[in-house]
Amino acid sequence: MKNNGKKPQKTKAQAKEVLSELLAIRAELAAQPSVTQSRMSQVHANYQESAHNLLHYMALRRRDLRPLQLRLASMGLSSLGRAESHVLATVDALVGVLQQLVDDAWTPPAATGSVVDFNHGESLLAEHARNLLGPAPPGREVRIMVTMPVEAARDSSLVHNLLQQGMDCMRINCAHDTASDWTRMIQNLRHAEQALGRSCRVVMDLAGPKLRTGPMEPGPAVVRIRPQRNVFGTVIAPARIWLTPETNPQQPPSPASATLPVPNEWLAHLRPGEQVRFKDARESRRALKIVEVTDQGCWAEATQTAYLVPGTRLRHGRKKEESGHRSAKVGNLPATENVIHLHKGDKLILTRDQVPGRPASYDSVGQILTPPRIGCSIPAVFDDVEAGDSIWFDDGRIGGVVDQVEARQVVVRITQARTRGETLRADKGINLPDSNLQLEALTEKDLADLAFVAQHADIVELSFANSAQDVESLQKHLATLCTRQPAVVLKIETKRGFENLPAMLLTAMKIPCCGVMIARGDLAVECGFERLAEVQEEILWICEAAHVPVIWATQVLESLAKEGMPSRAEITDAAMGHRAECVMLNKGVHIVSAVRVLDDILRRMRSHQAKKRSMLRELHLAHTLSEAPPTSKAALQELSQLHDGLAKDTPQLKQAQNA
């Protein structure tokens, strides 16, 4: 059916309806920067366009755009799903197309500043990432940040290997180690840079006001000796016990199941093959066999489980011979770590003081007499806690609700714990996501560390950034310490920090260079594990709208770094990190391998994903279907090509990437 060159009336009516809504949205976007002109005047020149685009994006996202997106998609138009870095330009382009559909000319109103178009938005983000994190290595746009273990201060080869495998940023956590350790880490980095001809940014993370459980009373001084048994209970390896002089104790020359200090004279009379007999803490008769005598001590073996305490009497030689050097007592033993065992429904007392905590006490039939109690590292938070607030311990392993707030303590009812129960130890994290905590972002330790940080760091990470005032406080202290301006990264790890992110970004934009870290550990506890994926997506969107680089952090390839083998979920998570500008690895025994694997993953993902946009490179699977079924030989060859494609990109793509 002919339409005589005229557009169907239904299409025109639909276009007019959508156009009307878009014009209303555009008016809101254009008015937004003028509302906050006083704040905009303080933004650094590097971020003027980015700040305008951020405000446009915030105005855009105040609506539920899903119905509009569906209508735009049905018309074959952009659905605003990739507008983050160039909001006004995207809306203007849509309005222009719709005006043509309704046969109406339209000229966008003159903007107060330059409109960030598609290419300029991406180039701004790339420029800001380069300024913050350094140049991207060839073949990989996402940088790799690595947290330094204390070994990096002593072992220069470790730093050299990390840099060689792809580290772009060295992160030093000021919550650990000392200024002299930090100095040696940076010196080792400078030597590695010279040797390899590579550059690497120094990132220093301020400790911040981390809430933690207080100390615990020491547990009993007892040593358990236990041989290794198979599934049938047969001993397959005896326990190895190191007997050392109590007046001049020596460390065992190789791993030991236990170390027992004993009198020097008694130890000098031991001979290989001799039996040392004793009654353990349970009054069970046990024996040790002396297998080696050295100048520093003696090795003994045990084939039965035993519990020894200070004062346990040891005898060697003939039975019942108690005189002289035949008998001795075990000396002082280190106290065991005390823990609090918690189950769902239990009560826990949090105290204001730092008196060592203790487990619950029980009566003869197992009923609790006194609930367990433990202190809090920052007792001032008690002033901001209310009954009904949720509370979490140890990275979210244990959850509870505040039942009562008293003058010197808070009573917590445990609501989340595994069926078999959980153990709470000293120095474990505490999160209060529902409480409006009035904590200063910079602690006394942070202020003391800032003198070193301002002098040596390229980037300062502000832990537990919760408000624009926190960001301003750091900026003011840095201004008084040095003339150079290190970049500032906001660590988003609380619910308040997430909710105040736009305001904090505008404040951070007062200086030439800034960034954001998604600290997913505490953030997951604060916002709820089920919301973490949603929250990190929103942070990525908002930061892209502000053209601010993002660091994807916490537990990336953690099993690989610590144990040498990654989980499948960790590989997927690391690949998702490609949507950020930097991915952070934490320390571990196998950290060099983790850097190498992450570098490989990020290089592969470069050809598949850019932010939210899928990159449609040649898909090898698309060649597996053809009109004629492949012969078995051809099928094998095609599978071989598919395997090779997973290991490397096509030569044409590699040439394009190098160009």
Image (tube, rainbow, N blue to C red):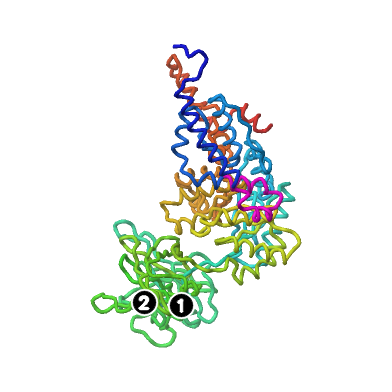
In the image as oriented, which residue stretches furthest toward the bottom?
A: 323
The residue type indicated by label 2 comes to Arg
User: In the structure shown, which secondary structural element does the residue marked by tag 1 occupy?
Assistant: loop
Mark 1, residue position: 352
**Magenta segment, principal secondary structure?**
helix
The picture places residue 640, in percent across and down from the top left corner, at: 50, 26
Q: Is residue 202 visible?
A: no
Q: Nearer the viewer, residue 380 or 221?
A: 380
Side (left or right) of 326 relative to 444:
left
Side (left or right) of 289 relative to 642:
left
The stretch in magenta equals 32-56
Can you tell which mark lies on residue 277? 2
How far apart marks 1 and 2 lie (CA) works out to 48 Å
Lower position in the chain sequence, tag 1 or tag 2: 2
The residue type indicated by label 1 comes to Arg
The picture places residue 281, in percent across and down from the top left corner, at: 34, 78
* Image point (53%, 82%), residue name: 247
* Image point (42%, 81%), residue name: 310
Q: Is residue 530 visible?
A: yes
User: In the structure shown, which secondary structural element does the residue marked by tag 2 occupy?
Assistant: strand
55 in magenta: yes
